[in-house]
Amino acid sequence: MSSLIAIAYDTLTLLCRRRLFWLNVWLSVVVVLVVASMSCHGTGWSLGFGLKSWPSGYLVKGSSWETTLFFGVVQRATQWWVAGAAPLLALFSMASVVPKTLNSGQAALLFTKTQSRAAVLLGRFAGGVIFAAIPALICVTGLFLTLGWRLGVWEIRLFLALPFALLLFSALAAVTVMLGVLTKSSSASLVVALIFAASVMALQDAASHPAGVEEETELKGMEPSDPRGSLALQIVTWPLPRTHELMEGMSRAIRLSGPRPFRDLVRRWRIGNLRVGAAAAEVLDATAEVPAPPVTPLKLSEAVLVTTGFCGLALIAAIVLLNRRDL
Amino acid sequence: MERVWFLTRFLRHGMLAFVMPEVKSIDLAIDLKSLTKVYPNGVQALDGLSMRVKRGEIYGLLGPNGAGKSTLIKCLTGLVHPTACRGTVLGFPVGDPEVNSLLGYLPENASWPEHHTAGQVLDFAGRLHGLVPRERTRRVTELLKLSGLEAWRNDRPQHFSKGMRQRLGVAYALMGNPELVFLDEPTDGVDPVGRKEIRDLIRDLKREGKTVFVNSHLLGELEMICDRMAILMRGRVVRQGSLEELTLESCRYEIAVAGNLLDNFGLMDLIHRLGGTVALTPDGVESRIELPTRRPQLVQPVVDALRQDGYLLLSVAPARQSLEELFMEAIRTGGQFKTREPGD
């Protein structure tokens, strides 16, 4: 256990010395600063701590639109940055850790000092997950303080985004670790892991929207899709990480729904006489997919269990591969 | 907690001793009866290798490139899985990861982590061994002093010379106070002063009762420090023993005589009958006789004949092969040594 903790700590210090880590941290701070720099006043709203101001008849200090604005922006910052881009940047840093560890010069130093190869791999993985948590924690804490400062709402549930984001990251990191053991190449493991993530999202999207697929094929005058194919797709995607459901579950867990829909606020957005928001909303409506069925607590628990199980299986596979390998 | 650990270890190794008699060989640090390694690409690195290393001795491993030296050390340290193996390391079956806490290893091409200073590298090794912080700090200071790197404690090994990196490697290997230390080319790239320090360090380890297994191309170094050694050729140990034992068969007497003996047919006939040879120095003023024997009685007839014929004897001395000569002969003959004492 002591060697596992030592390796996890070592991994963390190794990753924290990389430039990409500081880029991730600074971008997290920038995201928080952008959100924090928004404010509403008596005649409109401003960005950049008052540097640029826009007059508005409805988006003013104390209005329900102000809450809608902050809740909507914080929710999207959490989804896109905390659970999206920040872990992806962390993955770019982490991808090289396992292949470098298996490099003969380092492997000889490390594996002869530990009693278990699994401890080395799990230590590397744990260090990577903690590493990914740092920028996410900075961003969530910043957003939490921003909401408290701007609206007086101290929404502690915002921190529930962290376990969801880290679970999603863990699944991808476990695949990267396994591929790192298999290929001993940083770039190969990263590229294949990203292709895997994209494929999982696409497959699960297709599996969760069978009605949408049929609607589209009918529009083109084609035969409706075979229900057996849809069933097969669901069976294939069942053991894979549930990205869509976890993201949906995260949104529900942090419960940042304003008094009005954020979409309506976007729709009202104008630049001069141009109704930019409305145009954007129409484009979004036209390209929108059929909404997936809502995520029930049971479905969410299943998603958490399946994703955790997938992560565990990927790590076990990596350990088995490593134990069979000559270093 | 310690009791549980002791009990599980006792049960495990007690059982192993029951089913595997070789586990009982506690006076041997390494006891290999048959070690074979065939890599997936079909290369046979080790071919039923047998070897015995006693506890507390300095053991040298010699062999040309590709003989299987590194593969052997990697098998013994658990980095490479043997294809077939009967044998133990410190009483544990080869490949048992539990033995790692008792081993120290300096690899030939150690690649130091970029994010650690010399002090942090050793501290990390201490963490891996589960040492408590106070003990770790004490040991790091002690080993930095021992390796002469105290002044570079806060510098990164990437900026070190090859010799400094080797010394750091030795310190790293010694971090957990190991019973058996594997040193792969420990003096490679080290200056003469550093080499002597490493040799002294190895001797100190022996004095502390540790077993040191050294793999080196520098035969002179091995000759100076090793109690016993083995010559590895094509994955097999072709010779094993102390330097005395290894060079015993090469024992001979060398007689230096003033003048040219080649014209003295009677004397030449006697020397040839004893299996000896005569060579004239390039300037032609001195002859050198080599008699393949370690028994002085067999030299007497030649000495008597030389005196009788009025030759001036310059020297009569016993001689034996150097380790380098032995090694070169092994390479030349592919490990097939010939007996060199027809007179004995």
Image (tube, rainbow, N blue to C red):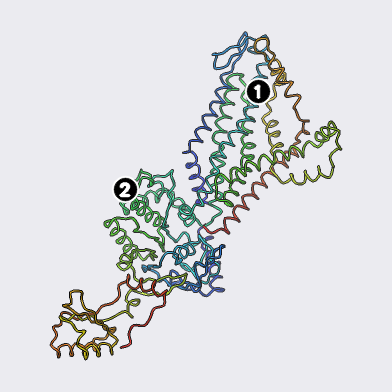
Say which amino acid is labelled 2.
Glu
Residue B103 percent across, percent down from the top left: 44, 61
Residue B253 percent across, percent down from the top left: 24, 81
Q: Mark 1 lies on which chain?
A: A
Q: Mark 2 lies on which chain?
A: B
Residue A248 percent across, percent down from the top left: 71, 33
For the image, the number of numbered tags is 2
Q: Which of B19 and A223 is in front in this view?
A: A223
- Same chain shared by disc 2 and disc 1: no
**Mark 2, residues whose alpha carbon is within 10 Å: few (<14), some, or many (≥20)?**
some
- Name the side, left or right, on which A78 lies relative to B288: right
Residue position for label 2: B150
Say which amino acid is labelled 1.
Phe
Q: Is mark 2 on a helix, strand or loop?
A: helix
Q: Quadrant of residue B155?
A: top left
**Mark 1, residues whose alpha carbon is within 10 Å: few (<14), some, or many (≥20)?**
many
Residue position for label 1: A71
Q: Is residue B344 visible?
A: no
Q: Which of A315 and B186 is in front in this view?
A: B186
Q: Is mark 1 on a helix, strand or loop?
A: helix
- Name the side, left or right, on which A94 lies relative to B141: right
